[in-house]
């Protein structure tokens, strides 16, 4: 009887994320918004603060609509940046 109960508890626990996994599963709104940027959009790298402009989508996510990475034109040439590595600065004129 106890073995059966343990097996049921193990099966339940296998499918439920623990407290450490929950924050990692959340996608912030900035990353979600950056998946559909258009060509010519000014962006800045989170890693080194380098500015650039999006040329085109480099790779798409599995849904075929959202971007996984972009080709970005910088002062050093073209680079590929992933969506989570960039942010769009506020354009206040």
Image (cartoon, helix red, strand yellow):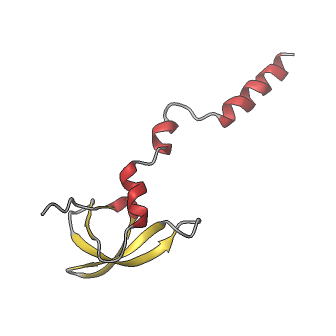
Numbered marks: total? 0
Of residue 34 and residue 80, the one placed in the foreground of this image is: 34
Of residue 46 and residue 28, the one placed in the foreground of this image is: 28
Q: Quadrant of residue 83?
A: bottom left
- Residue 63 image position (x, y, % from top left): 58, 65
Q: Quadrant of residue 11?
A: top right
Residue at horizontal 15%, vertical 60%? 92
89 up-or-down from 54: above or below: above
Which residue is most to the top? 1
Which residue is most to the front? 93
Quadrant where the image shows the N terminus: top right
- Residue 74 image position (x, y, % from top left): 24, 78
Q: Quadrant of residue 64?
A: bottom right
Judge from the rendering whether residue 82 lies leftward or rightward of residue 52; answer left or right: right
Which residue is most to the bottom? 77
Judge from the rendering whether residue 37 lies leftward or rightward of residue 15; answer left or right: left
Residue at horizontal 52%, vertical 68%? 65
- Residue 85 image position (x, y, % from top left): 34, 61
Quadrant where the image shows the C terminus: bottom left
Residue at horizontal 58%, vertical 35%? 17
9 up-or-down from 86: above or below: above
Which residue is most to the left? 93
Residue at horizontal 55%, vertical 32%? 18
């Amino acid at each position: 009887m106890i073995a059966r109960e343990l097996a049921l508890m193990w099966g339940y626990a296998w499918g439920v994320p623990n407290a450490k996994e929950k924050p990692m599963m959340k996608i912030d709104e900035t990353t979600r918004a950056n998946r559909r940027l258009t060509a010519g959009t000014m962006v800045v790298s989170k890693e080194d603060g380098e500015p650039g402009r999006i040329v085109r989508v480099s790779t798409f996510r599995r849904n075929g609509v959202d971007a996984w990475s972009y080709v970005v034109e910088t002062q050093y040439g073209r680079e590929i940046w992933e969506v989570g590595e960039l942010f769009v600065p506020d354009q206040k004129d």
